[in-house]
Amino acid sequence: MNIKDIQQLIKFVAKSGVSEVNIESKDLKIGIKTGNEEKPVIYSGSPTVLTHPNNPISETQMSSPEIASEQENDSEDTNLITIKSPIIGTFYRKPSPDKSNFVENGDLISEGDVLCVIEAMKLFNEIESEFSGKIIKILVDDASPVEFDQPLFLVDPS
């Protein structure tokens, strides 16, 4: 089972409404728990999350449902796509300290391009783009912890 299979499994479990799934084989054991208790999602990591280049929102404000819906509406109105973290881990913008960043603001990306690496349990998982477009904003600082489904990049697909 590769990382894409695991990501698809996580998405399937989250959409299905099941609260817990455990899969075990001779060489792999996966446990997925979802919080279907309708609690507000609060992302940890960088101290601010930008929904618009001129409109910073603090983490404490992010827990407000009105602010979260405004962020979604801003993204829908401007046709921007948000690339979110498929796993919990540490976000890195480059493959190693002596290399250059995978992408920068304003870069054009294609489907399959590596955008970043997320380290989880000493494994470095390359996060690839699922579509083509232009990087509008990188929402996470290098070497910052990220949560599952946390926004990482804003991309203009046009």
Image (cartoon, rainbow, N blue to C red):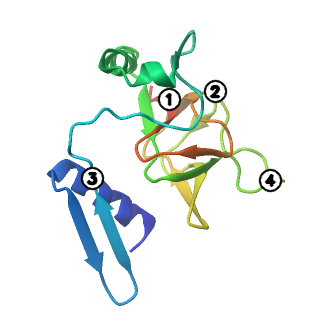
Residue at (61%, 67%) from the top-left corner? 122
Which of pointers 3 and 2 indicates the residue nearer the eye? 3
Q: What residue type is labelled 2?
A: Gly
Mark 4 → mark 1, Cα distance in angstroms? 24 Å
- Quadrant location, the C terminus: top left
Per the image, label 2 sits on a secondary structure element best described as: loop
Mark 2 → mark 1, Cα distance in angstroms? 10 Å
Report the residue that reaches farthest toward the right: 98
Q: Which amino acid does label 1 sit on?
A: Leu
Q: What residue type is labelled 3?
A: Thr
Residue 106 disc label: 2
Residue at (52%, 43%) from the top-left corner? 110
Q: Could you say which is closer to the camera, residue 148 or residue 133?
A: 148
Whichever of labels 4 and 2 marks the residue nearer the N terminus, that label is 4
Residue 86 disc label: none
Whichever of labels 4 and 1 marks the residue nearer the N terminus, that label is 4
Image-based side of 80 in relation to 31, left or right: right
Per the image, label 3 sits on a secondary structure element best described as: loop
Mark 4 → mark 2, Cα distance in angstroms? 22 Å
Residue at (59%, 35%) from the top-left corner? 140
Q: What residue type is labelled 4?
A: Pro
Mark 3 nearby-residue class (10 Å; few <14, some 14–19, many ≥20):
some
Question: What residue does disc 3 label?
Answer: 34
Whichever of labels 3 and 4 marks the residue nearer the N terminus, that label is 3
User: Pointer 4 and pointer 1: residues touching (CB < 8 Å)?
Assistant: no
Question: What residue does disc 1 label?
Answer: 154
The image quadrant that residue 157 belongs to is top left
Residue 97 disc label: 4
Per the image, label 4 sits on a secondary structure element best described as: loop
Depicted 154 relative to depicted 17: above or below: above
Mark 3 → mark 2, Cα distance in angstroms? 35 Å
